[in-house]
Amino acid sequence: MAGRSGKSRSAVRAVQLAPGVAGSSRRVSRQPAPAKPETLADVGKAMVALGRQARAAAQELALAPTKAKNAALMAAAGEMRAQVAAILDANARDLAAVREHRATAAFLDRLTLDPKRVEAMAKGLEEVAALADPIGSVIARWSRPNGLTIERVRVPLGVIGIIYESRPNVTADAGALCLKSGNAAILRGGSESHNSSRAIQVCLARGLRAAGLPDAAIQLVPTTDREAVGLMLKGLDGAIDVIVPRGGKSLVARVQEEARVPVFAHLEGICHTYVDRSADLAMAKAIVVNAKMRRTGVCGATETLLVDAKAPAGHLPALIAALIEAGCEVRGDAAAQKANADVKRASEQDWSTEYLDAIISVKMVDGVDAALEHIRKYGSQHTDCIIANDEDTAERFLARLDSAIVLHNASTQFADGGEFGMGAEIGIATGRLHARGPVGVEQLTTFKYVVRGTGQVRPG
């Protein structure tokens, strides 16, 4: 559900569908590929039809056997490997269009696909196939004195609308997770990744067909018109059960403000790493550089480094030097500027900025409690880390910080469903209702009660 305005929000990533790839002679869908809507009226009709098809597919998918769902995922993975050239060609067209608008390096990184990333998507589908099927599992069972047996059983959410921006890999991740959890997906990606998402969805559609499952289980919105987003947020005449936005602050804010259906979302990943006085310097340097620089454009990247004022005198200069050597711009408080002349002065806004780039803000704080206070004030309850050898201090940090993910002596870049052994994720949920942390197959389910009796009636 949508979190409280401000910091308690859920996080999620989105996916988009595609009718076909240019040059492919194989038919992907049982129905003709939808024509691209040309007017607002056309968009409305197309989206309502999309919703109806998704609702019908969801009813069938909810009863699909695990074997069929796994077969679809494995077949889609095989198609992805076979179509790597087509996927990369589509991605090249997206990149060429974006470069004309002088996109940032971080944005281009999020959009770019290469053979290694395509293979990672294919492996991700196989990993989801290998996961236990949550549907039909009995969460709890008990009996009443009158002989009734009651079970709480996992069931799909229904139809999930996923709205996302530049990451084409979300198409594969979200499609796979929705399929495995028995949900139909309506995927609406950004215009910048439209060609890439189309090519990836073709592989998913072929996998569904090969397994005898309905093509409409994973559909791509056939237009980049923003009106389609508005229609999804209204629920498509009751077809959509939940919306998952995955993208920038403006997208997620719009979804939370306009949605008439439940939302899993987070506005920002303002992640912190705190280096305690008890931290090992070599460990701290390795973690801090990885947490910031491994992938600067992911939501689990550290954006602010906090260093204990009582740490050994050489720790702050050494950490800053390691970041600068790795190619990171450092903005800091007076202590950070004193530690290194290349540090730029941090503004008040820096402490609450999700850079998604090779930039970090650095501040000296008076111990773990001051670090907690800073994170509570400026953070987004996404992912925060403490580097410390003192176990009591570490436990204080982990227990008193109410973020979706808290880490001890490990990089914030581990904030990922795959790294948690969940196969993949749609995103990181930071709200408190329904899902929190990486949103995988289990988090995309709800439950119902199954009550079995032998003729019992309730006494008057």
Image (cartoon, rainbow, N blue to C red):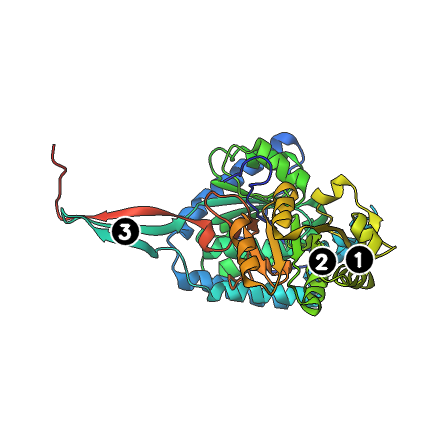
Q: For numbered disc 2, what is the local secondary structure?
A: helix
Farthest residue, direction right: 341
Identify the amino acid type marked 3.
Answer: Glu
Mark with earlier residue (3, 1): 3
Q: Are marks 1 and 2 in contact (CB under 8 Å)?
A: yes
Identify the amino acid type marked 2.
Answer: Lys
Q: Nearer the viewer, mark 3 or mark 2?
A: 2
Task: Tell me the CA gap for discs 3 and 1.
Answer: 54 Å
Q: Kindly identify which residue carries mark 1.
A: 328
* Quadrant (top left, top right, bottom left, bottom right) of the C terminus: top left
Q: Are marks 3 and 1 in contact (CB under 8 Å)?
A: no
Res. 123 mark: none
Mark with earlier residue (1, 2): 2
Could you tell me which residue is drawn at 70 percent across and 67 percent down?
A: 281
Q: Nearer the viewer, mark 3 or mark 1?
A: 1
Can residue 185 be seen in the rendering of this structure? Answer: yes
Vertical placement of residue 59 versus 24, above or below: above
Task: Tell me the CA gap for discs 3 and 2.
Answer: 46 Å
Q: Are marks 3 and 2 in contact (CB under 8 Å)?
A: no
Q: Kindly identify which residue carries mark 2.
A: 292
Q: Kindly identify which residue carries mark 3.
A: 151
Vertical placement of residue 388 versus 368, above or below: below
Could you tell me which residue is drawn at 30 percent across and 54 percent down?
A: 140
